[in-house]
Amino acid sequence: MWLIDFEPVQGAEMNKVRPAVVVSSDSVGRLPIKLVAPITGWQAHFVGNVWHVRVEPTKSNGLSKESAVDALQIRAVSIERFRTRLGRLTADQMEQIAAAIAIVVEHT
């Protein structure tokens, strides 16, 4: 979990400096980029969205409020956009995020 600067953006992309989860493996690729899923504050209308993974704040993840990982907005970003390391998610949470990404990608 990192604070990442998503500016500049276009259209409906998530903006500003916000938390994100690194979802790419360190063993993949040679470029200084990572695949990340941005995080936003949890909203009641996210219930039932398969692309939003709810995450409660804990000491280990560094979040300050109930949040949602948005698997629909995964993107590759330069490591130069990384600002501050926040913490880590559990293996179970990472599996939920991977499952949400798989649904969004519709890999069959």
Image (cartoon, rainbow, N blue to C red):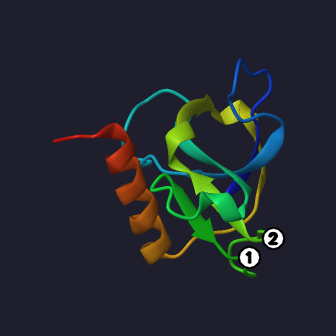
Q: Earlier in the sequence, mark 1 or mark 2?
A: 1
Image coords of residue 44 (percent x, y): 69, 65
Q: Secondary structure at mark 2?
A: loop
The amino acid sitting under disc 1 is Pro
**Tag 1 residue:** 57
Residue furthest out toward the left: 108
Image coords of residue 47 (percent x, y): 57, 64
Which numbered dot is residue 65?
2
Image coords of residue 9 (percent x, y): 74, 22
12 above or below 65? above
38 above or below 55? above
Q: Quadrant of the C terminus?
A: top left
Question: Tag count in the figure?
Answer: 2
77 above or below 49? above
Looking at the image, residue 62 sits to the left or right of residue 51; the answer is: right
The amino acid sitting under disc 2 is Lys
Q: Secondary structure at mark 1?
A: loop
Looking at the image, residue 104 sits to the left or right of residue 51; the answer is: left
* Mark 1 crowdedness (10 Å alpha carbons): few <14, some 14-19, many ≥20: some
Label 1–label 2 contact, CB within 8 A: yes
The residue at 44%/74% (across/down) is 91
Image coords of residue 20 (percent x, y): 66, 51
